[in-house]
């Protein structure tokens, strides 16, 4: 009986082994289980441009990417790829855009009237105040221009995916950090623009992103190489691209903060690298995180690294068949706009804001028009931040524009120099956008030569009309030297009290004219050797000014008129 049981057991084990053999053949032969590939892209500011080159070569070599994640600059590249942009398209867009303009808080000069440009060049240093208490922003740059740029690139793809990152052409993840709790935040749904804007908010350089009541900053502070977020998507093979380098030089705050984040998260990056099947290190040693102007070279560096690493990648992949799992891209029907709402106004009048919004109730939702609306609101100069939100209900949508008004109070510092009088320093205290009209009430004093005190109201617009106006009173003290036939005779002082009123209108963006009236009372304090020690002089009459400038910058122009 025991012999029968033993023979039966051996026969069972033999059959079981035979059943397992095809699985082994499936892994080693032509019938292996297809693999999916995920790609994780690190942060690194401008160094992240090298990721584009990595993606280019992977596509050229027929290695399909089914999942992608990114942090900071890596989230921009990964997000665009997930939205359906090809590496060549990303190369064309991200290497030609003016990053210095995107990272600037200034409105482009060619988008403002000349009167507004002159108004913005009164001081070389300005500090906002709230009820005369100086206000220090949470970041040097608001990233408003970057946010509008991302809205133009990604808002429609985000809508077509029903705001689910798994429904994009390629499922996508990006990482940010909660500045209050320090927690890692992995975005899987919602607005791609909000998610990426949060992921690139380098602390101290760019202001935090406000997303659903949370202040979020650059994901590089907690996870600069986001391999772990890919694991829930279950790729069979993960390629990580890590561009962080210990360069010996740091030119500006972006370089310093990027390096600081790399130091803080080094242990986490090591752990993330262990989760990847292959880690690529683009050769970006000769670049800095702030080298956005060298984007083309960075893309080429990524390409070169990927080509060198390709034999090793293919060796790791073996002869596994690779499968491309991508969601079909299709444009969803756009709902009709039910109403347009504006939130966040404190001072500015709603009627003025609505004149800059072309989106109307009853129109079909148009993302290009939304971007143009955001740009026009930004160009008013009245708002620190503008964004939009879509509230869906049945087959309709409410378009909500959310604005954060500037702190219209400011302290200003200006410098003046000429070869006769030397240096003068000008201080100004002002309150702008009075009663929502655009008017500015200011007091200024100049120390040096001449000494000057002024108070008045001025503006480059009235409500939504491009009127210019200035009403002011002033007093100044000027020292003069009297010469006769080239010989100095004596010095004297002139005291001036005056008032001026001017009203005008902008003629396009490069010119304006004003009509006004000026009255000045001069009191010349002459030395006793002249005889008549004190002499009064009055000048009064109408004024006409026409100002024209086609320069691209009033202070440091790069283009001749």
Image (cartoon, rainbow, N blue to C red):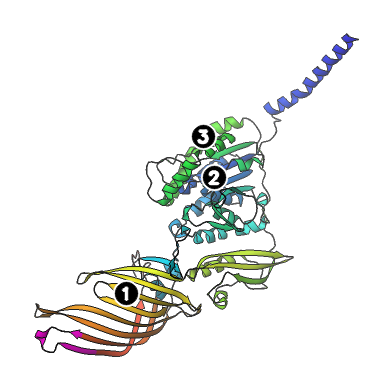
Question: Residue 518 sits in which quadrant?
Answer: bottom left
Q: Is residue 59 visible?
A: no
In the displayed structure, 223 sits above or below 211; it is above
Q: Which one is in front, 9 or 509?
A: 9
Judged from this view, the residue extending furthest toward the right is: 1
Q: Residue at x 61, y 30 (%)?
A: 318
The residue under label 1 is 445
Q: Which residues are magenta?
A: 524-537
Check disc 3: other Cα within 10 Å, few if <14, some if 14-19, many if 20+.
some
- Front residue (pair 300, 517): 517
Q: Is residue 425 left or right of residue 269?
A: left
Q: Pick the residue in front: 504 or 256.
A: 256
What kind of element bears circle 2?
loop
**Count of marks overlaid on the render:** 3
Q: Residues within 10 Å of mark 1 (few under 14, many from 20)?
A: some
Residue 259 as seen in the image, left or right of residue 31: left
Q: Earlier in the sequence, mark 3 or mark 2?
A: 2
Above or below residue 522? Residue 219 is above
Image spot of residue 485 (x, y percent) = 8, 80
Q: CA distance from mark 3 to mark 2?
A: 28 Å
Q: Which quadrant is the N terminus positioned in?
A: top right
Tag nearer the camera, 3 or 2? 2
Q: Quadrant location of the C terminus?
A: bottom left
Quarter of image, res 286: top left
């Amino acid at each position: 009986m025991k012999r029968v049981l033993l023979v039966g057991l051996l026969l069972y084990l033999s059959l079981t082994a035979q059943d397992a053999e095809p699985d082994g053949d499936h892994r080693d032969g032509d019938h292996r289980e297809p693999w999916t590939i995920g790609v994780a892209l690190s942060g690194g500011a401008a160094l992240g441009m090298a990721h584009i080159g990595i993606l280019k070569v992977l596509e050229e070599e027929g290695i399909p990417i089914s999942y992608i994640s990114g942090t900071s600059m890596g989230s921009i590249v990964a997000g665009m790829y997930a939205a359906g942009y090809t590496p060549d398209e990303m190369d064309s867009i991200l290497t030609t855009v003016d990053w210095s303009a995107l990272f600037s808080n200034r409105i482009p000069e060619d988008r403002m009237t000349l009167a507004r440009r002159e108004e913005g060049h009164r001081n070389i240093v300005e500090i906002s105040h709230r009820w005369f208490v100086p206000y220090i922003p949470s970041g040097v740059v608001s990233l408003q221009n970057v946010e509008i740029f991302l809205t133009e690139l990604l808002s429609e793809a985000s809508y077509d995916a029903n705001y689910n990152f798994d429904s994009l052409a390629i499922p996508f993840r990006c990482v940010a950090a909660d500045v209050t709790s320090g927690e890692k935040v992995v975005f899987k749904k919602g607005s791609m623009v909000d998610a990426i804007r949060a992921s690139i908010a380098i602390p101290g350089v760019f202001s935090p992103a406000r997303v659903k009541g949370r202040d979020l900053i650059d994901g590089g502070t907690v996870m600069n190489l986001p391999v772990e977020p890919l694991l829930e998507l279950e790729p069979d093979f993960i390629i990580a691209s890590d561009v962080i380098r210990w360069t010996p030089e740091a030119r500006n705050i972006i370089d310093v903060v990027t390096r600081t984040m790399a130091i803080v998260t080094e242990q986490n990056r090591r752990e993330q690298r262990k989760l990847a099947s292959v880690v690529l290190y683009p050769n970006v040693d000769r670049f800095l995180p702030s080298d956005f102007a060298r984007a083309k070279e960075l893309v080429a560096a990524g390409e070169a690294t990927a080509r060198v690493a390709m034999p090793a990648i293919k060796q790791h992949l073996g002869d596994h068949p690779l499968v491309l799992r991508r969601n079909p891209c299709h444009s969803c029907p756009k709902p009709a706009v039910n109403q347009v709402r504006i939130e966040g106004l404190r001072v500015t009048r709603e009627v003025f804001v609505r004149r800059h919004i072309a989106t109307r109730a009853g129109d079909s939702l148009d993302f290009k028009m939304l971007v143009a609306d955001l740009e026009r609101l930004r160009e008013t100069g009245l708002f620190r931040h503008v964004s939009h939100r879509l509230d869906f209900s049945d087959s309709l949508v409410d378009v909500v524009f959310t604005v954060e008004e500037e702190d219209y109070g400011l302290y200003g510092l200006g410098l003046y120099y000429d070869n006769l009088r030397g240096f003068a320093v000008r201080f100004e205290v002002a309150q702008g956008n009075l009663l929502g009209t655009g008017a500015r009430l200011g007091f200024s004093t100049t120390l040096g030569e001449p000494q000057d005190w002024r108070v008045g109201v001025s503006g480059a617009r009235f409500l939504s009309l491009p009127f210019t106006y200035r009403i002011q009173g002033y007093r100044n003290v000027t020292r003069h030297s009297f010469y006769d036939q080239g010989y100095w005779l004596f010095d004297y002082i002139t005291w001036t009290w005056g008032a001026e009123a001017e009203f005008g209108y902008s003629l396009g963006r490069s010119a304006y004219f004003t009509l006004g009236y000026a009255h000045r009372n001069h009191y010349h304090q002459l030395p006793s050797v002249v005889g008549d020690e004190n002499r009064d002089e009055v000048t009064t009459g109408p004024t006409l000014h026409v100002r024209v400038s086609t320069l691209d910058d009033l202070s440091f122009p790069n283009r001749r008129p």
